[in-house]
């Protein structure tokens, strides 16, 4: 820290305290901090403050650029990354989110291996107290890390929207990101869903894989206590925030978010497996359910009920339309179950009954809740859109594509939207969904032109 650094931080705090929403004040703060960092490049508090200001200016890519200059390593990844992770998600930097989360998971994997080695060496040397210290640290601090849990969930959410870096031109060394839903990973209602789901299931019980968030969420559902999660975050790095504040997720909020992600992705896994086992009608009659399909359907419906009961934070529920989007997701899931396997407990199972029941669910539940969500998100900010996209929109779209695939199998595809009620209900849902996405696109376009 060099002389004058505190004055720069004090000036930034004073400006943000007096004009918290004034763009000119934010730009002035950014200029002050850039000059201060150039004068004192080793002062981490100046960089933390600059990350906050650039995120306020919707320039999260600059926050990420500054974060990388901090050179955080080892335990700092677990204790200090919390300051940038929410910014990356709300800034739409999904590739960077996964990159950072993977670094955190690699650190935990290496730490677990080294801890075992060091404790073994200590025992061979006869220093049993030191061996116990290593093991207690690993068990109480690392294995139950809150940051690790959050990183696993964020990887699950961002996997489907990862983009692939490609070269701009043959003569240039810089790359640009080329994205496509489910291009690299994730269950998105595509042709590779079943193969991906079987591969993912093999990793669910690996404690150092992001997919273990699914098995953890299931264990909590079955009654396991969640009080053992350890918050290793170092809040002293926030001492630069003297007169202004930034949103900071509480421990309970992070745990609830991890539970939601684990339950939703567990649901997507079961949906992909269920769709693979559904058989179309023969000679105008439904095919009887075999034991395997019954088990898949029962497991899927249990997961649907769990997702429907997920608790959301009040601000997330109100500003993001999360409650309505989860209800729309639940409606799509029930419709998928009815079309593919029939109504549970109904003896007279016919094609007509399946079509009427699924259409009613789509019209009265899925469509109406999606409409409410669209109304809530109508004037959303860029940050809210970037948050909602991987967390809620992609799962809803994935289930819709799965349901559309099963409807095609039963002869209720999009070409029958005017002659079949179920196809018409699907078309209405698709129209509402497209209108919501078009609203997002318009907001992002206005944002890009405003930045130019």
Image (cartoon, rainbow, N blue to C red):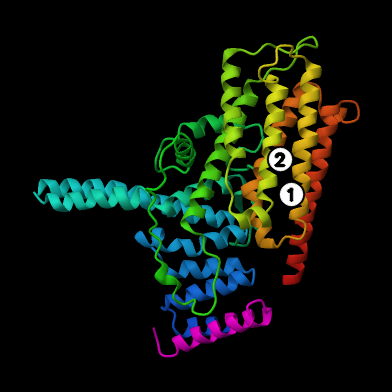
For the record, the magenta segment spans 1-30
x, y (%) of residue 218?
Answer: 48, 36
Specify whether 105 is left or right of 418.
left
Q: Which residue is mark 1?
A: 373
Q: Taking the image as drawn, is residue 58 in sight? A: yes
- Image quadrant of residue 358? top right
> Spatial distance from mark 2 to mark 1, Cα to Cα?
9 Å
**Is 246 in front, or is 163?**
246
Report the predominant secondary structure element of the magenta stretch.
Answer: helix
| Label whose residue precedes the other's in the sequence (2 or 1) | 2
- The residue under the point 66% across, 51% down is 389
User: Which residue is at the far right?
Assistant: 418
Q: Is residue 131 above or below residue 216?
A: below
Q: Which residue is mark 2?
A: 328
Asked whether disc 2 touches disc 1, contact meaning CB atoms under 8 Å apart, the reply is yes
Q: Is residue 191 above or below residue 89?
A: above
**Is 253 in front, or is 281?**
253
Magenta stretch holds residue 173:
no
Q: Is residue 192 above or below residue 257?
A: above
């Amino acid at each position: 820290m060099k002389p004058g650094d505190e004055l720069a931080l004090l000036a930034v705090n004073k400006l943000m305290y007096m004009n918290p929403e004034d763009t000119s004040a934010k730009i002035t703060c950014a200029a002050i901090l850039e000059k201060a960092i150039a004068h004192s490049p080793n002062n981490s508090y100046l960089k933390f403050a600059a990350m906050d200001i650039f995120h306020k200016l919707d320039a999260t890519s600059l926050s990420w650029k500054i974060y990388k200059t901090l050179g955080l390593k080892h335990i700092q990844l677990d204790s200090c990354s919390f300051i940038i992770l929410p910014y990356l998600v709300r800034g739409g930097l999904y590739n960077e989110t996964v990159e950072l989360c993977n670094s955190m998971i690699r650190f935990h994997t290496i730490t677990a291996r080294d801890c075992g080695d060091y404790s073994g060496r200590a025992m061979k040397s006869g220093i049993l107290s030191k061996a116990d210290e290593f093991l207690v640290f690993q068990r109480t601090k690392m294995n139950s890390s809150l940051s690790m849990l959050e990183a696993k969930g964020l990887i699950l959410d961002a996997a489907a929207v990862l983009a692939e870096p490609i070269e701009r031109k043959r003569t240039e060394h810089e790359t640009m990101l080329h994205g496509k839903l489910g291009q690299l990973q994730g269950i998105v209602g595509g042709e590779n869903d079943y193969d991906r789901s079987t591969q993912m299931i093999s990793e669910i019980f690996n404690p150092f894989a992001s997919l273990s968030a699914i098995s953890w969420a299931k264990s909590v559902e079955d009654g396991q206590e969640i009080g053992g999660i350890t918050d290793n975050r170092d809040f002293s790095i926030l001492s630069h925030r003297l007169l202004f504040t930034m949103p900071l997720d509480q421990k309970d909020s992070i745990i609830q978010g991890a539970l939601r992600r684990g339950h939703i992705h567990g649901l997507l896994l079961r949906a992909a497996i269920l769709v693979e086992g559904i058989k179309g009608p023969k000679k105008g009659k439904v095919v009887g359910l075999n034991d395997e399909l019954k088990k898949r359907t029962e497991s899927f419906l249990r997961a649907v009920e769990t997702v429907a009961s997920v608790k959301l934070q009040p601000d997330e529920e109100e500003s993001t339309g999360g409650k309505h989007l989860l209800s729309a997701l639940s409606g799509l899931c029930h419709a998928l179950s009815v079309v593919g396997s029939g109504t549970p407990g109904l003896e007279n199972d016919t094609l007509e009954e399946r079509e009427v029941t699924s259409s009613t669910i789509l019209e009265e539940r899925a469509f109406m809740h999606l409409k409410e969500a669209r109304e809530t998100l109508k004037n959303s900010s860029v940050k809210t859109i970037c948050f909602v996209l991987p967390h809620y929109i992609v799962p809803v779209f994935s289930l819709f594509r799965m349901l559309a695939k099963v409807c095609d199998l039963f002869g209720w595809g999009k070409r029958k939207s005017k002659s079949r009620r179920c196809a018409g209900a699907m078309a209405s849902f698709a129209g509402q969904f497209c209108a919501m996405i078009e609203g997002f696109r318009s907001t992002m376009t206005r944002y890009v032109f405003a930045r130019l």
